[in-house]
């Protein structure tokens, strides 16, 4: 059997005393944690796909090194090619292995590290969760284009500000979330926190940014997302960033792209 160290893992001995009233000696367990993982991300304020990968690792309680590249800067142009031929973030590095698609990252991590965030145990719920996750991964292009992630801003916008295609996608997301809560009862989309939730967290934050109000059932997802500690930490980091992307900030009337106070 290969040692944890040979797999790029860190093993820490933890000694547990024998329970009172039980026969036997103290016993020692190995707590194994991932230390070889590196996650390449973009600006926390703007990069929704970086948030997905980062949140997945955080919720999976895996240790990893975070490497941030400021989007569309000189550093970006010179550094991103070192990590991926696709020229996009996020990128997960595990030793000399590079994975540059969010779903591929999650499946790779699940194959190599047990007890990470995954899919519902029920077969039907698992199929449903995979379907809605894939729907997000491949779709909602108008929402992505017209409501880009910008966590430092919160403005009340009218749905009339957006195209008919974007409005239809917002309605689809609202009904999708409502259906999930009515089917499974929460606290997350398909019961326990899963990859499906990871995929939709940045969408919920987009709705906060642009002041999109949903029906009370669907709104439960946004409330849950905003209460999640790793999401709060990510948003706090985003608020402290100095970088600005004018082509995104310009979509918010009256916002000049200055750092949040």
Image: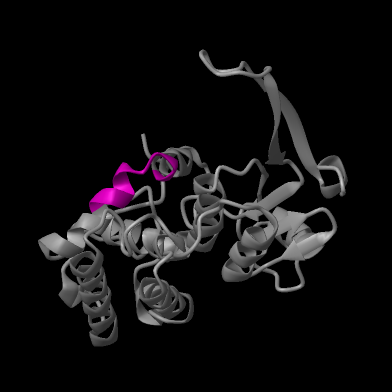
Q: Residue at x 61, y 66 (%)?
A: 107
Would you place residue 80 above or below residue 260 in this image? below
Foreground residue, 204 or 57?
A: 57
Taking the spot 27% from the left edge, 74% from the top edge, the residue there is: 173
SS assignment for the magenta stretch, majority? helix
Front one among 17 and 90 = 17
Instruction: Count the numbered circles shown.
Output: 0
Identify the image quadrant of the C terminus. Answer: top left
Judge whether 29 appears above or below 185 on screen. Answer: above
Q: Quadrant of residue 227?
A: top left
Viewer-nearest residue: 116 or 146: 116
The question of residue 174 being in magenta is answered with no
Q: Residue furthest bottom?
A: 165
Q: Is residue 51 visible?
A: yes
Residue at figure coordinates x 20%, y 56% from the top left: 220
Q: Is residue 33 above or below residue 184?
A: above
Q: Residue furthest top?
A: 20
Whether residue 126 sits left or right of residue 87 in the image: it is: left
Residue 15 position, x and y percent, is 68, 20
**Does residue 213 appear in the picture of this structure?**
no
Q: In this picture, is 255 found above or below 171?
A: above
Residue range in magenta is 223-231
Asked which quadrant contains residue 25, the reply is: top right
**Which percent across, then down, holds residue 169?**
28, 80
Task: Give me the residue at 50% from left, 51% from top.
Answer: 55
54 displayed left or right of 211: right
Given residues 216 and 186, the one toward you in this image is: 186
Position in image of residue 251 (x %, y %): 34, 65
Q: Position of residue 164 (x, y in %)?
A: 23, 86
- Does residue 222 appear left or right of residue 59 in this picture? left
């Amino acid at each position: 059997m290969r040692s944890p160290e040979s797999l790029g893992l860190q093993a820490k001995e933890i000694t547990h005393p024998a329970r009172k009233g039980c026969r036997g000696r103290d016993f020692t367990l190995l707590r194994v944690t991932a230390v070889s993982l590196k996650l390449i991300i973009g600006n926390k304020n703007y990069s929704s796909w970086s948030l997905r990968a980062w949140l997945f690792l955080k919720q999976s309680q895996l240790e990893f090194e975070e490497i941030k590249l400021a989007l569309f800067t000189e550093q970006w142009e010179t550094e991103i090619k070192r990590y991926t031929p696709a020229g996009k973030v996020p990128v997960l590095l595990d030793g000399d292995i590079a994975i540059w698609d969010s779903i591929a990252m999650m499946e790779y991590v699940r194959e190599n590290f047990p007890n990470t965030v995954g899919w519902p145990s029920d077969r039907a719920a698992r199929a449903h969760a995979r379907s809605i996750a894939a729907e997000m991964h491949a779709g909602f292009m108008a929402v992505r284009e017209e409501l880009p992630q910008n966590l430092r801003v919160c403005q009340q916008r009218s749905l009339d500000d957006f195209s008919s295609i974007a409005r239809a996608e917002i309605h689809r997301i609202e009904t999708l979330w409502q259906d999930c809560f009515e089917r499974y009862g929460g606290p997350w989309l398909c019961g326990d926190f899963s990859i499906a939730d990871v995929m939709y967290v940045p969408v919920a934050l987009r709705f906060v940014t642009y002041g999109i109000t949903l029906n009370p059932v669907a709104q439960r997802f946004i409330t849950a997302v905003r209460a999640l500690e790793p999401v709060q930490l990510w948003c706090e980091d985003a608020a402290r960033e100095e970088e600005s992307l004018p082509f995104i900030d310009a979509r918010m009337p009256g916002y000049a792209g200055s750092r949040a106070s």
